[in-house]
Amino acid sequence: MVTIHADTEPLYIAPPGGTCGAAPRLMPWAATSTYAFGPLHIGVRASTLRLKALLDEVLADRLVTDGRAPDNFSVDLGDATAGASSFFFLLRGSEKLVRTRDISRLVLGLLRHLEAFLPPMTEEPLLETGLAALVRNGRAVLLPRAALSSPEIVGRRLYAHGVLTLDAPYVAVSPVTRSLVVPALSTAIPAQARSRLEELAPAGAREQVVGPGRYPIVGIVGFVAEPGDSFGLAHAVHSAVAHLARPADPAQTLAAAVALCAELPRLGLPMGKPGEIATSLLALSEAVCAGGPEHG
């Protein structure tokens, strides 16, 4: 538990726009907890008091008593009366960050989003970009985050075919090794909290997630107007550097991004409805991710 001294001024993140909730809620949200990540205080709203107590247990070392952070993230266990058909959601405003039936995946996704506000734990120069990442057969593909904006269609189809999405607010890329770098979480979930997670999980709801390690990047995907249109180098570089999480030296960063995108296969993703995007992503990932696992 974190104790705040009177002379310490916490920093806050402005709450996101939009109404939190995967769908209009019939019941009010239960409560919001505040967690400290350095001087930054982050608010996480829970749909039930039992869920709030669980998150407070998982993040006990960062819990701020009497914290007043706004609702930066929301964790929704959905309709408990729906049984196995109920989905859990991690949201930021109206954006669905994680949609799952596995509460362990939900909590791990929340931890990845919260720990993204901490300084990097490595001195290795990494590009931390707002692109998303898919992992198939131990290989990674970078793509626009907007391609995954309908997880109930795109994410479900991808997962059903063994394609995992990285539940993180950005992806860390090593330009030197051309690999996706997924760091280990610094938050260790206590054994008692793990048991509580199992109690809340529906039977057979366990889902595979992208674990810590390095995954060779075998392609970068970008939207194109029509099937067969090329995804050019300038477009790829722009997508890689447009949303850098922690911008480094601009010239050095741009040079690294150009070198990375020039070496990677660039794959055009035709604009379309979510189902069409899912079909295209399955075909693209199958083409470039063939073979056995290579991640380390």
Image (tube, rainbow, N blue to C red):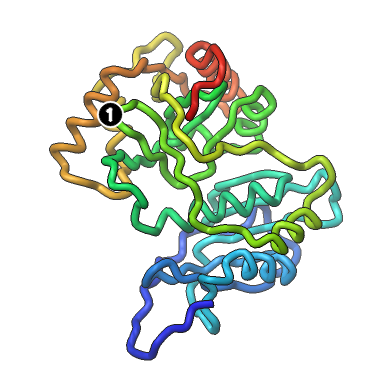
Q: Amino acid at mark 1?
A: Val
Query: Residue at horizontal 55%, vertical 12%?
Result: 291
Q: Residues within 10 Å of mark 1 (few under 14, many from 20)?
A: few
Say which residue appears at 67% left-offset and 50% top-offset.
104
Vertically, is 250 above or below 289? below
Q: Residue furthest bottom?
A: 6
Q: Position of residue 195 (x, y in %)?
A: 76, 58
Measuring 46% from the left and 60% from the top, which residue is drawn there?
16
Residue 226, image x and y in percent?
A: 43, 14
| Viewer-side residue, 230 vs 117 | 117
Name the spot of residue 142 as percent of width and height, x first: 42, 29
Provide residue 245's location: percent of width, then percent of height.
33, 48
The residue depicted at 65 percent of the width and 51 percent of the height is: 89
Relative to 33, residue 261 above or below = above
The answer to whether 48 is drawn above or below residue 109 in the figure is: below
Mark 1 lies on a secondary structure that is loop
Quadrant of the rendered image containing residue 130: top left
**Quarter-of-image position of residue 85:** top right
- Which residue is nearer to you in this view: 126 or 79? 126
Disc 1: which residue: 176
Q: Nearer the viewer, residue 165 or 94?
A: 165
Which image quadrant: the N terminus?
bottom right
Residue at the outermost top position: 228
- Quadrant in the rendering for residue 230: top left
Q: Nearer the viewer, residue 51 or 191?
A: 191
